Image (spheres, rainbow, N blue to C red):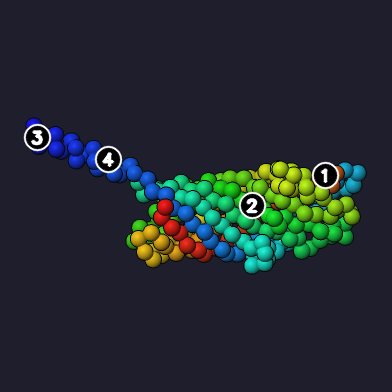
Amino acid sequence: MRSAFLFVLIIIAFQTQSQKSQWYFELKGGFPLDVPMPLTIHQDGYPDININFARFTSEPFVMPVYWDWRFVKWKNEKAWEFEAIHHKMYLQNKPAEVQRFGISHGYNILLVNRIKILNKEKNILLKFGAGTVLAHAENTIRNLKLNERLGIFNMGYYFSGVALNIGIDKRFKLTEWLYATSEAKFIPSYANVPVVNGNADVWNCSFQFSFGLGVKL
């Protein structure tokens, strides 16, 4: 009877231990590579401006720099992650009607990701997820400059679209509570941002590469 009782206690302890979760925080820098994609600008009283292959540059190392932070919750060798990415976009091939078109404060991507272990020995992880785009547009179309003091809290931000994410992450253990991490990911997204008397449909496909540190909380 005592042995059976002890066995039950061991099973309960094991189950409890296996169900424990562990939180981590990561902060990274990096750079994106944007694929040329369609851009359409709608403005009341004028024909649409269509750019079939809009070329955007990011300037990830110029303030405000590219950053990527996330909170990760691991449990039973799988994890959920909330990720925030600060991406910037500056249109390069502007037609004559467009004096300025940027989303630089920025093209913020907020994601919920699922993480699975791809190779346990090498600490390689597979991530996939979805989320939204929080955009801050800056533009002047046909000499009409957008008021950047509207939107959320009158700060120029709008929840503007959707994003998907798939990525591979490699971790390098430094101590029991600290590790380095590098990641390559692909993020297709869409956002609808304001212009004066209209809006713009922005499609973006971005390969993003990031490097940083993670800490056990």
Residue found 52% across the figure and 48% down from its top: 82
Task: Name which of mark 1 and mark 4 comes first in the sequence.
Answer: 4
C-alpha distance separating marks 3 and 2:
59 Å
Q: Residue furthest right?
A: 45
Asked if the residue at tag 2 contacts the one at tag 1, i.e. Cβ–Cβ closer than 8 Å, the answer is: no
**Pointer 3 residue:** 2
Which of discs 1 and 4 lies nearer the camera? The answer is 4
Task: Name which of mark 2 and mark 4 comes first in the sequence.
Answer: 4
Amino acid residing under circle 1:
Gly
Q: Residues within 10 Å of mark 3 (few under 14, many from 20)?
A: few
Task: Name which of mark 3 and mark 1 comes first in the sequence.
Answer: 3
Amino acid residing under circle 2:
Asn
C-alpha distance separating marks 4 and 3:
20 Å
Asked if the residue at tag 2 contacts the one at tag 3, i.e. Cβ–Cβ closer than 8 Å, the answer is: no
Q: Is residue 115 visible?
A: no
Q: Residues within 10 Å of mark 2 (few under 14, many from 20)?
A: many
Which of discs 3 and 2 lies nearer the camera? The answer is 3
**Pointer 1 residue:** 198
Asked if the residue at tag 1 contacts the one at tag 3, i.e. Cβ–Cβ closer than 8 Å, the answer is: no
The quadrant where residue 1 appears? top left
C-alpha distance separating marks 2 and 4:
40 Å
Amino acid residing under circle 4:
Gln
Task: Name which of mark 1 and mark 2 comes first in the sequence.
Answer: 2
Is residue 129 depicted above or below 32 in this figure?
above
**Pointer 4 residue:** 15
- Mark sitting on residue 108: 2
